[in-house]
Structures are given as structure tokens and as C-alpha cells.
Image (cartoon, rainbow, N blue to C red):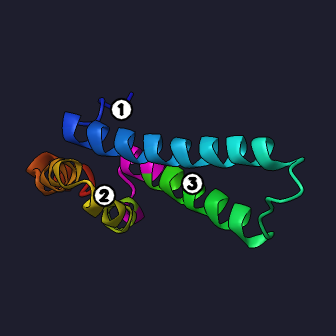
Amino acid sequence: MRPAPPECVLFVARVHALVGAAMLAGLTLLTLATRNLPGIGFGPIAPLAAGLLGAFYGLAAGLVWRGLPPGRALSTLASLLYVIRPPLAAQVRAAMRDPAFVAHFAR
């Protein structure tokens, strides 16, 4: 049985998973709320883009959690969104610089 990932890995994976879940939940609620409103409509690209972005964050969370090599690169790319929230961005970047986080991908 694999040992549990370090706390810094769990933190980064949880943040990515929550952001992805929030994107998908927002997409679902917005679609349901505006479905029957004739004056408000979204083209086919908007839900597709939001859904793919939410899935991307979910994929990044899963790869980070499992310690797979692409997870580190996807996590770095995903963390660019957090720049608009400086305290969160600082916490995520600090966790990603942690030696335990780097070692999690070295196995």
C-alpha cells in the first residue's frame, strides 16, 4: 500500500480540485438558470471552454495526488489562475517549492 502523500501535496491537489469543482458547478448552475431565458444565451463555445477548464483542474489535482510527472507541470500552469488571489498564490507556490512536494514526483 502506498503511503499517504505529504501535506503540501494534499494542499495543492485539494486547491486544484476545489477550483475545478467550482468551475463545473458554476457552469451547471448558470446553464440551468439561463436555459429558458430568451434574452440570455451563450454560444456553444462558452460551456465547452468552462467544462474543459474545470476538467483540466481536476486532471491536475489527480496527477499531483498520484505523483505522476505531468502533474508538476500542470500544477504550475494551473496555479497561474491564483495570481489574482495573492495570499492563495503565495501558499500554493510555497507548497510547490517544498522539498517534500518535489520528492513526491521523484519516485
Q: SS of the residue at dot 2?
A: helix
> Measuring 77% from the left and 65% from the top, which residue is drawn there?
42
The magenta span reads 61-70
Front residue of 43/68: it is 43
The percent position of residue 53, horizontal first and vertical second, equals 56, 61
**Amino acid at pointer 2:** Tyr
Residue located beneath label 1 in the image: 2
> Measuring 66% from the left and 49% from the top, which residue is drawn there?
27
Asked if labels 3 and 2 touch by Cβ distance under 8 angstroms, the answer is: no
Res. 82 mark: 2
Q: Earlier in the sequence, mark 3 or mark 1?
A: 1
Q: Earlier in the sequence, mark 2 or mark 3?
A: 3
Residue located beneath label 3 in the image: 54
Instruction: Classify 45 as above or below 13.
Output: below
The percent position of residue 75, horizontal first and vertical second, equals 35, 60
In the image, is residue 18 part of the stretch drawn in magenta? no
- Rendered image quadrant of residue 28: top right
The percent position of residue 15, horizontal first and vertical second, equals 36, 43
> Measuring 80% from the left and 62% from the top, which residue is drawn there?
41
Q: Residue furthest front?
A: 39
